[in-house]
Image (cartoon, helix red, strand yellow):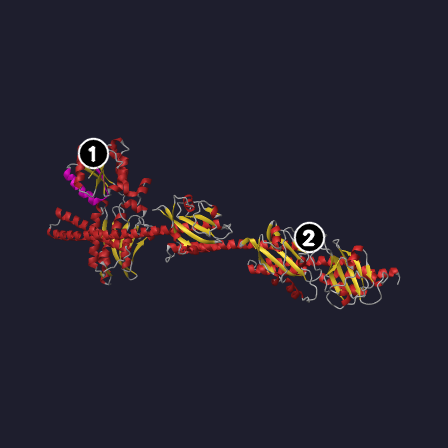
Amino acid sequence: MKESSLERNAAEEALAIAALGMECEDLKDLPDILGQVGDATDSFAVLLWELAPGGDLGDEGHPGQLFVLAHWLSNGDRFASHTLPLDSFTGRAIQEKGPSICHDVTKDKSVYQGPPAFMSEYEIRSFVSIRLKFGDAELGALNFYWKSGPPISETDVRFRLAKAFAQVLPGIFAGLREKSSLKMIRRLNASIQSFEGHAARLQLSTAREALHNMACTIRDGFRCLEVSIFLVRADVDPRIARLETTTLESYIRTREYPFGNPGITGWVLNKRKPVRIFDLASFERDRGAIESRYPGLTGFDLANLVEITRDELKVGDNDSMPPFSFVAVPILVGTDLLGVIRCCTPVNAPFYYSDRDEKLLMLAASQIGHCWNNWVQLVKINNEKRSWELLVTSMNDLISGVSSPGRQEEKAILEEFLQVAHDVIPGADICDVRLYRPKDKELYFAATYGKAWKGNKRAEDTFPVSGPSAGALVFKTGKPRLMHDVSQDELYNTLFGDVKSMVIVPVGTGNEEPYGVLDVRITTDLGIPPNAPTIAIALGRQLGLYLHLLRTLEKVKQAEVEREKILKTQTRVFEDLEHQLRLPVAQAHSRLSKLLAQEVAGSQIMSNAKAIGGLLRKADRVVRGMGHFVRLAKGQPLKPIPRRLHRGSLVRLLIEICMDCVFLEGVKSRGLSFYVNDATFGVLDLMTVECDPDLLEQAAYDIIDNACKYSFNFERILVVGGVDGGRFYISVMNKGLDLPEEDIARVTERGWRGPNALLATGQGSGIGCWFADQVMRAHGGRLRFFPTTPERVTEVRLQF
Amino acid sequence: MKIVGLEDDEPFWETFVEELKSEIPGAEIVWIRTEFEFWERIPDFVKSPPDIFLLDVMVKWADASPNPPPAPPEVAKESYYRAGLRCRDRLRESESTADVPVVLFTVLERSDVVGAITALPPNTFFVDKTGDTKEVIRAITSLTGSRRTGQGQMN
């Protein structure tokens, strides 16, 4: 075959391989590509090497090595070695910058024979090493190995193919590495998005599960055994990074890294810089280079990691171990350090972490950092929101309890307030309420909360408000006091050694002198939580309102008791008066009747006696009316003693009432007259009507007396009987002041008097109609009013 | 002697007048039953002032009638409770009636009208109506016999 044809064929083959490489997605596919290359060149094995990169393996450090990036053996075996000395055949090929052909491996002393004894084990006869330059300017070599066939020469088609492949392979490798990196970042972002959209994202377990998924994604992308993420939780302790997840639990020796902790992971936390070490197993050998690159980094003891790794990678006892390559980067959000992520022990080629890998991990750490930071803020906001919700709910429950009939003692209510303070303010483990005792002008512990208070005699301490204590100052000024560090506050009165910070707020309504103070003592090192002062002030205000309500209720209760006492006394007095007055009035009446019986009609004595009789009857009615009023005011219903109503006695009673009105109400000068229509009461001969005569007299007098007051001068007042719907009634009709329809409903209200009536009648208590209505209702009837007619006639009925 | 009385309690007035006539025979006693009627007759009093006014403190404004006289604002506000005091104030608006002695009598307790009686002008006196009417009559005869120069109360 001509030279040019050979070259063209080789180029075409190389392009075909390149096209194949474009279709692959991951570095894991690189061995397959090498396989294609191997088949094309009829090789037994193809190995891709890279010179140790800068950094870890810098000029001053390691004497120089080559590391396998990918390998393919036609028999499917795994290449057991990971490194090659720089002074090997391949190393020289790289340094001499040209392809090198080893025609016979047994005869060329520069060929590395092991361990492991790859050449002899697989009876490699010849091989070619072609120098490469990777995209990031790192150097390497692509080696082809043959077991049989004629010796390789530069004119050999296999050699030409090998050279062609060597030209495209760096590009393929770079492309695959990019794709792998991109794939890892995409998967990481998908994990983060999935977590941020999770319904239960606020739960720590969900966050940890998401972190584990992210760690697994990085593990797959970095092809390593261990990925561990350590994070700082500011709400627990801002100075410790704790293990939140790992992909290999057996690698974990320390679960917490307090800041300042020695060791590689601790160094990353302290310095906030990444660390990348080629092989932890060679730490001592490479110490110089490591210390110059990472000043202050102390040694590392592999301990049992070797055994663990052998088991995990299933590496035989006689096989060489891959390097314990290690990279750790800080997780930063802005300048805030949130933790560290580390990767260790690659399981596949390439068995080291490049500078590029370190940058990729920094990017991943940044993504994880932002996700974690957002979660922490969200949890913090949610916790605050829950605290406020809990506070409001607790307050509602407490206030409901205060106003309910079976409310608890004051001390129990205060203790419930303190429980709420403990529940909603993180770290508020020791709380109390101190109330003011005016008699002694001091504050005393009215209620306490927290284990520290149990059996503590300090609960009997008191604090004069004139004294130099923080509580006294808050009480006097009404202003809260925040003590972020009690040991630095001169006014802090040491009661408990565990207290680190404290909030004291007034207990009051804000409108007057406080009732006392609320003490919230925090025992954690985290200081006063941001929302604690606001919550404490709200609690103090609510507590103040409760105490105000409680004391007001007590005053009202006492006032009610006093009022009851006064009312009782008053009614007793009325009853006494009634008793004291009725008897003399009755006696006077009796003697008067005797006198009237003896005297001559028409005489002056008779005239005066009749007047006295009328006055006595009025006095008797007023006294009896007072008695009934008092009983009704006490809530005791009227108890009629019913007797059959006879026509004759009823008419006589009504006439007597009218005559009393004539005399007593001044109707003579006004020209008023009365007419009691006897005939209309004939119905009583035909039907039985029962009523209490005393009560009826009272009611009838009130109605007829009203008729006198409201009648126009020189009019007649008519009193008749009747039946309406089978029910007997006594009707009083007069021509006088209007009673409009709209006032009818109010007429029987106790004490109500219409404005026009007030001007026309003068004195009166406004209880006449009310009482008459009560009397009729006690008889199963009622007082009925009919609106004034156009003729100015008003009718009032005592309806039975 | 001419006595003008403002009183809406007819029985009380009848009894009182009987005693007054027996103590002051020949006295001309004018009876007015409502505050409105008193105001209507003030011009008569101005023209021919009496020797003494007897004014009940609580008196109704007017009798019930088809067209009752409208009550002035102070009457509508205070109602009948201070009618006598209002009438006394009207008397002081005229020179001829301002110096005529006035006896205010009422069933109200002294404490109920303390504001009014502490401000009484020199010729106005407060008397408890529920007490012995002879005391009232003695006061009237004393006042009309020799005029007092200082304010005071008479019981």
Label for residue A386? none
Secondary structure that dominates the magenta span: helix
Q: Chain of mark 1?
A: B
Q: What amino acid type should be assigned to the residue bearing mark 1? A: Asp
Q: Nearer the viewer, residue B82 or B152?
A: B152
Q: What amino acid type should be assigned to the residue bearing mark 2? A: Ala
Q: Chain of mark 2?
A: A
Check the image and report above or below for A231 versus A123: above
Residue A125 location in percent, x, y?
A: 81, 66
Task: Say whether residue B15 is left or right of residue A214.
Answer: left
Q: Which residue is mark 1?
A: B51
The residue range painted magenta reads B4-23
Position of the C terminus of chain A by quadrant: bottom left
The residue at 17%/38% (across/down) is: B137
Is A28 inside the magenta-drawn segment? Answer: no
Q: Is residue A666 visible?
A: yes
Mark-to-mark CA distance, 2 and 1: 135 Å
Residue B64 location in percent, x, y?
A: 28, 45
Q: Is residue A197 visible?
A: no
Residue A681 location in percent, x, y?
A: 23, 58
Q: Quadrant of residue A627?
A: bottom left
Check the image and report above or below for A194 versus B8: below
Q: Which residue is mark 2?
A: A289
Depth check, mark 2 against mark 1: the one in front is 2
